[in-house]
Image (cartoon, helix red, strand yellow):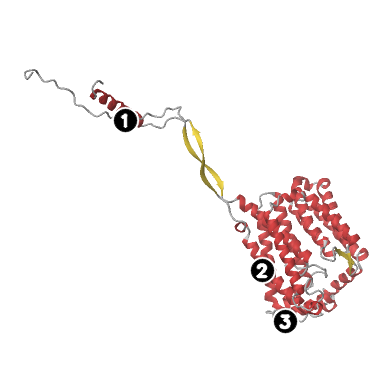
Amino acid sequence: MADQPLVEFPPVTADVPAPRPVRATPRSTPQFIPEAVPVERKRSFIATLDGYFLIVVGILLAIGLMMVYSTTFDWSYQQFGSESTIFMQHARNMLIGVALTVLLALIDYRIWRRIAVLILLVTIGALIAVLIFGDDVFNARRALINGSFQPGELAELSIVIYMAAWLSSRRTQIRSITYGLIPFAVLVSIVAVLVLLQPDISTAATIIVVAGIMFFLAGADLIQMAVAGAIVGLVGVIWLTNLGPDYAQGRLDSFVSGSSDITQADYHVQQAIIAFSNGGLTGAGLGQGKQKFANLPAPHTDSIFAVIGEELGLVGASVVVALYVALVFRGFQVARRSVDNFGSLLAAGLTIWIAIKALLNIAVMTALVPPTGASLPFISFGGSSLVVVMCGVGLLLSISRVKVLQGIPKRTTPISVRRVTGANNDRGGRHRRTRLSSDSNSRSHDQAVPGG
């Protein structure tokens, strides 16, 4: 056996499994790639509000609180035994207005377009009701529920909402007499005549002027508007001189006389001029005015701008005017940036409405127009006026919010997958080389194992 040749056996290796070959993905094999889906970023309610607009309105409300207290503390003490009773009523009305402002800012303004007809019908019903059941004060019926609600103030806001909805739906038909001018004149006349029957000349004039400007902004024919304006002016003069209340003719006569001689002006205007003269440049000081004591008629409502001129001077009065100018400027910016025609007309109409109310009150106090009973927005005492104006602010904020929400940038989040069956992009043949190398290693390993 020692002489037998040695037989060489291959080396015994461990039974190690071969690596799994890597195969290229066939062209028909689907790949799943995450798809980035845009998701809207959420912002808080306060972050979507127009801060510039809120600051202006807030300052005007603060001035209103100061001036209402300054003009009513003596009257409140004499009548109620407390200097702040009437002031607290104004603060309560302001809080109600703020609450309605927040509510209307939360609601998408476009919902009011659907119920604009209903709003107008309810307003007309309230105007008829005040003529039948209203409180008779100074030979006028303007309020319901013991003087706490004046439908005339609501009519101003309602006509703005309805005109915005109606004009935005007419488009090119606005320039037509049959489908544009005549229906417009009938609708505005119905509301204005009901207000004149109270009588309330300043509110009726505000409704006519605001609706006319909105009609112009919507694209009305200028010739038609000129003719209609001339007719309205002629009818107004005839009504004031022959059919209107007795005080209207007297105020018109005193205004004409006072335009050349201020001593012949209306008593109300003369007392306002004295208040401005006493105030000078910097004013007599908050609460130190004298004209509000039994001289100025209605110092807490109609004459409150004259009290501002006396106590805060020309500087304070100029600040108030500048705040209204800033508010109007911002309101028109909201109208210009609105997402639809209804929003543009609504924002423009609300801005014009507030501007005309402020301009009318200031013009009366400075003897530029005949005396009227217009209040100063945000500042004068009066629940209906303040609450309705704050509702207008809420609508403006809603229009601005809709634009902001549509302009919020979107973030992308991979929340879904997309099936892709496109061609294999392995142009370099990396998968093929890997597979060949793996097959070669597998074959060499099989040959090395005994019995392979």
Q: Quadrant of residue 362?
A: bottom right
Determine which residue is flagged by label 1.
Answer: 19
Relative height, residue 236 to residue 301 (above, below): above
Residue at 84% x, 66% y: name it. 147
Q: Position of residue 80 (x, y in %)?
A: 80, 77
Image point (72%, 59%), residue name: 100
**Circle 3 sits on which residue?**
288
Of all residues shown, which one is farthest toward the right? Answer: 242
Q: Label 1 is placed on what type of residue? A: Pro
Choose mark 1 or mark 3, whichever is in front.
1
Could you tell me how far apart the alpha carbons at marks 1 and 2 are, in whole angstroms? 79 Å
Q: Position of residue 169 (x, y in %)?
A: 75, 46
Residue at the image position 82 percent from the left and 68 percent from the top: 373
| For residue 443, above or below residue 313 | above
Say above or below: 434 vs 129.
above
Q: Residue furthest left?
A: 3
The amino acid beneath tag 2 is Ile
Identify residue type, mark 3: Gln
Which of the labelled discs sits on residue 321, or is there none? none
Can you tell which quarter of the image residue 9 is in?
A: top left
Q: Where is residue 124 shown, x and y percent of the image?
A: 85, 55
Q: Nearer the viewer, residue 74 or 274?
A: 74
- Asked if disc 3 and disc 2 are in contact, CB closer than 8 Å, the reply is no
Q: Nearer the viewer, mark 1 or mark 2?
A: 1
- N-terminal label among 1 and 3: 1
Per the model, the C-alpha gap separating discs 3 and 2 is 21 Å
Secondary-structure class at tag 3: loop
Q: Residue furthest front?
A: 1
**Residue 61 visible in this rendered orientation of the protein:** yes
Q: For numbered disc 2, what is the local secondary structure?
A: helix
The dot on residue 59 is: 2
